[in-house]
Image (spheres, grey):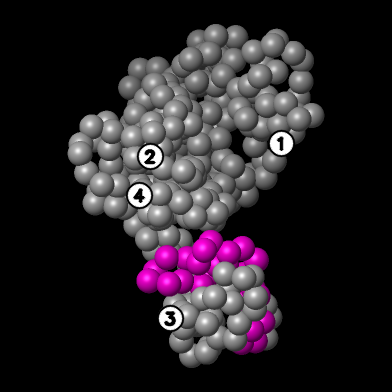
Amino acid sequence: MNKVQGWLNVYKPKGISSFNAVYKIKKKFNLKKIGHGGTLDPLAEGVLPIAIGKTTKLIPFINKNIKEYEFKIKWCEQTTTDDSEGEVIARSLKVPSPLEINNQILKLKGSILQKPPFASAIKINGKKAYQLLREKKNFQIKERLVFLDKVSLLDSQKQTSKFFIRCGKGFYIRSFARDLGEKLETKAHISSLKRIKVGKFEAKNANLLDDLLNIRQRLFEFKGFHSSLCMLDDILAYEIDDEKDITSISQGKSIKLDIKKLIKAPLDLTDEKFIFLTVRKNVISFGKLSGDLFKPNKVLL
């Protein structure tokens, strides 16, 4: 079982951390190497991409992917954590109308500045922000540039509004809710959060965590188990079958490629291109392609 590698699409339920969800899968299937892409808060549910075996080295590529969420904002209250688990620290009587909300979110698109929540894993002088918050230390978090592709209002009922959002790496939905409240001259926090997509990983194809832990199946027999290559978006890839080339790559050596055999071959190879080498659709290395010479950055053999 420890030789299995690939991606597993898992639906994390509320009330458990991403770390604990991964630990339960690791223990159940006796896995040596396992990791996840894009942490979900315990309060949140939804798609959690799980990497098995050497595929864990590809997690940074999944974390760069566009993500989609559905979530609810509760108006009139701001909390310490910007979600319903925190203590209320500010109140307002104003509930924004759907018209006010739509007028405001129309202005929000592209690269925007966002300050992560105090209850986050952002490191401040080597310590995670949520630890400093628990210790009641005074600290500040710097704003950073994040990408917002689309946001839309789905429904509004009394003090709660439901939204859809499509965003990039490092985007905090809790920060979005807090900031939107301020822009609408009220207070706000997240009351529920569901991640429905991460790159090619979708909620409709995900395995429920309880099913993974209770059904007697081998890991690669579950739906939503994918080769290490097929879940990576918009990549240059090259399938190799020559044993000499595979041996050279395993030793970290450069090899020459037949450019005509490139999957999704680029029009211009004058600049160095990032590329994945595969054997039976599983990534064995990634690195730079200069002309027809492949130089490995990392080897997954």
N-term mark: 1 or 2: 2
Q: Are marks 2 and 3 in contact (CB under 8 Å)?
A: no
Residue 106 percent location from the top left of the image = 50, 43
Looking at the rendered image, the disc whose residue lies closer to the viewer, 4 or 3, is: 4
Query: Looking at the picture, which amino acid does disc 4 mark?
Result: Met
Q: Which one is closest to the eye, mark 2 or mark 3?
A: 2
Asked if the residue under mark 4 is in contact with the one under mark 2, i.e. CB atoms within 8 Å, the reply is yes
Tell me where residue 32 appears, x and y as whole percent: 46, 43
Callout 3: SS:
loop
Residue 264 visible in rendering? no
Helix, strand or loop status at disc 2:
loop
Residue at x 55%, y 9% (from the top left corner):
87
Residue hosting label 1: 143
Residue named by callout 2 = 30
55 shown above or below 236: above
Q: Which residue is labeled 3 in the image?
A: 241
Under mark 2, the amino acid is Asn
**Mark nearer the N terminus (2 vs 3):** 2
Dot 1 alpha-carbon crowd within 10 angstroms: few under 14, some 14 to 19, many 20 or more: few
Can you say whether 204 is above or below 180 in the image?
below
Check residue 39 for magenta coloring.
no
Looking at the image, residue 88 sits to the left or right of residue 230; the answer is: right
Q: Which residue is mark 4?
A: 1
**CA–CA distance in space, label 1 to label 2:** 41 Å
Determine contact: label 3, label 1, CB under 8 Å. Answer: no
Magenta stretch, residue numbers:
273-301
